[in-house]
Image: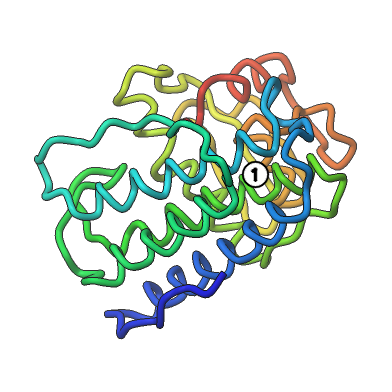
């Protein structure tokens, strides 16, 4: 899968997110070609690898549409497409279409998950979405998970700065009244209330925990403080 030629972008940060998205799409596509379509996805009960590929295809198309939607405009409906005869080929097309849409003008005002923003903001969001689902395919195939350390750390931060606030706005969960400290390469704070517990471990497993792909029972995670309250918070709909 060959992504479109990288266009000039406005800042080094935007360029970094763009490069991360293109690289992650390539990694996802390679796994989609390797992992059997009917392989079960441990982190998504009831889903197969084929379902993950179809889902990310739809997410990319939705993000492309939103990147062309002016702030305050009608939000395109978000739903998974009907499975294609060749889901992997359909994904490759959607991945290229997403980059094309964002590359048209990364500074173009549009709708984002955090409210009004620019098309370039979607590079970061879709890089992280693709990262999580790349790991889903790796798990389905019994293969190692891999990603640059700085990308994993930024994906943890995004749950806290973008995804959880949106989940609260949409009524999918309530604003936490307590907080859990997440300690990896950084120290993050989940929730605005008093800290009742600390979860320490690798950034990758903290990210999986936030995306409900892992639990606090993970061997690499250490919980101190009020485990019950921490688990109640961590098992809510922090992410879509």
**In the rendered image of this protein, does residue 100 appear above or below residue 7?**
above
Is residue 20 shown above or below 208?
A: below
Question: Going 71% across and 50% down the picture, which residue do you hit?
Answer: 204
**Front residue of this view, candidates 112 and 4:** 4
Residue 55 percent location from the top left of the image: 52, 37
Residue 84 percent location from the top left of the image: 52, 39
Total numbered circles: 1
Q: Furthest-bottom residue in view?
A: 8
In the rendered image, residue 59, in percent from the top left (x then y), is placed at 43, 43
SS category of the residue bearing label 1 = helix
Name the residue tied to disc 1. Answer: 207
Left or right: 98, with 154 as reference point: left
Image coordinates for residue 106, horizontal then vertical, percent? 25, 69
Pick the quarter of the image with the N terminus: bottom right
Q: Is 73 in front, or is 81?
A: 81
Q: How is the image coloured?
A: rainbow
**Residue at image x 50%, y 64%?**
21
Nearest to the observer: residue 169 or residue 15? 15
Q: Residues within 10 Å of mark 1 (few under 14, many from 20)?
A: many
Q: Is residue 98 above or below residue 206?
A: below
Residue 68 placement: quadrant = bottom left
* Residue 114 lies in quadrant: top left
The residue positioned 13% from the left and 35% from the top of the image is: 74
Image check: 179 left or right of 152? left
């Amino acid at each position: 899968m060959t992504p479109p030629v990288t266009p000039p972008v406005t800042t080094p940060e935007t360029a970094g997110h763009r490069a991360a998205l293109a690289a992650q799409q390539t990694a996802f596509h390679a796994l989609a070609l390797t992992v059997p379509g009917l392989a079960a996805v441990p982190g998504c009960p009831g889903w197969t690898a084929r379902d993950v590929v179809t889902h990310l295809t739809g997410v990319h198309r939705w993000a492309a549409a939103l990147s062309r939607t002016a702030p305050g405009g009608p939000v395109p409906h978000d739903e998974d497409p009907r499975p294609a005869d060749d889901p992997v080929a359909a994904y490759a097309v959607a991945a290229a279409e997403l980059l094309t849409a964002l590359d048209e003008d990364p500074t173009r005002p549009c709708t984002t998950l955090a409210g009004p923003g620019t098309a370039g903001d979607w590079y970061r969001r879709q890089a992280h979405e693709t990262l999580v689902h790349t790991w889903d395919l790796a798990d389905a195939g019994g293969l190692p998970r891999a990603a640059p350390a700085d990308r994993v750390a930024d994906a943890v931060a995004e749950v806290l700065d973008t995804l959880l606030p949106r989940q609260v706005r949409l009524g999918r969960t309530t604003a936490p009244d307590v907080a859990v400290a997440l300690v990896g390469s950084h120290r993050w704070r989940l929730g605005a209330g008093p800290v009742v517990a600390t979860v320490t471990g690798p950034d990758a497993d903290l990210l999986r925990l936030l995306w409900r792909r892992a639990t606090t029972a993970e061997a690499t995670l250490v919980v101190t403080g009020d485990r019950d309250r921490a688990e109640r918070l961590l098992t809510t709909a922090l992410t879509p």
